[in-house]
Amino acid sequence: MTAAVHICRHCDGLITDPDDAVYLGHEPGNSGPGWDVYAHRAHADLVGPDPVATRILARVLIARASAGRSSG
């Protein structure tokens, strides 16, 4: 059995020590099951949310708020 290879989300470096890998969450895929996201223990606090997804969510929330205000 081989150990899983993890890549740090912050520095894109290989995480060679399994005890240094911090699980950050699961990222769904468009055409498959997705993948788990890891970071080095020292970089875990430096990883932020995906800026593209955050921007899209903000636009959706603004559009919903504007639509609710104009129909009221």
Image (cartoon, rainbow, N blue to C red):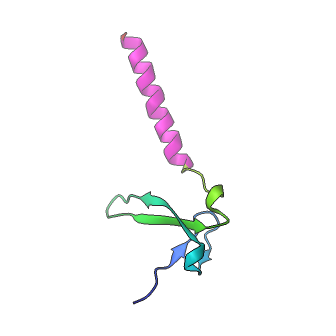
46 or 63, which is in the foreground?
46
10 w.r.t. 63: above or below: below
| Secondary structure mostly seen in the magenta stretch | helix
Q: Is residue 46 left or right of residue 64?
A: right
Q: Position of residue 38 (x, y in %)?
A: 53, 66
60 or 42, which is in the foreground?
42
Q: Residue furthest bottom?
A: 1
Residue at image point 47% right, 38% down: 57
58 or 17, which is in the foreground?
17
Q: Position of residue 14 (x, y in %)?
A: 59, 77
Q: Which quarter of the picture shows residue 36?
A: bottom left
Residue at image point 47% right, 59% down: 25
Based on the picture, tell me whether residue 64 belongs to the magenta stretch.
Answer: yes
Residue at image point 62% right, 73% down: 13
Q: Position of residue 50 (x, y in %)?
A: 54, 51
Q: Residue furthest front?
A: 19
6 w.r.t. 30: above or below: below
Q: Position of residue 35 (x, y in %)?
A: 41, 66
Q: Is residue 40 left or right of residue 66?
A: right
Based on the picture, tell me whether residue 18 belongs to the magenta stretch.
Answer: no
11 w.r.t. 50: above or below: below
Part of the protein shown in magenta: 51-71
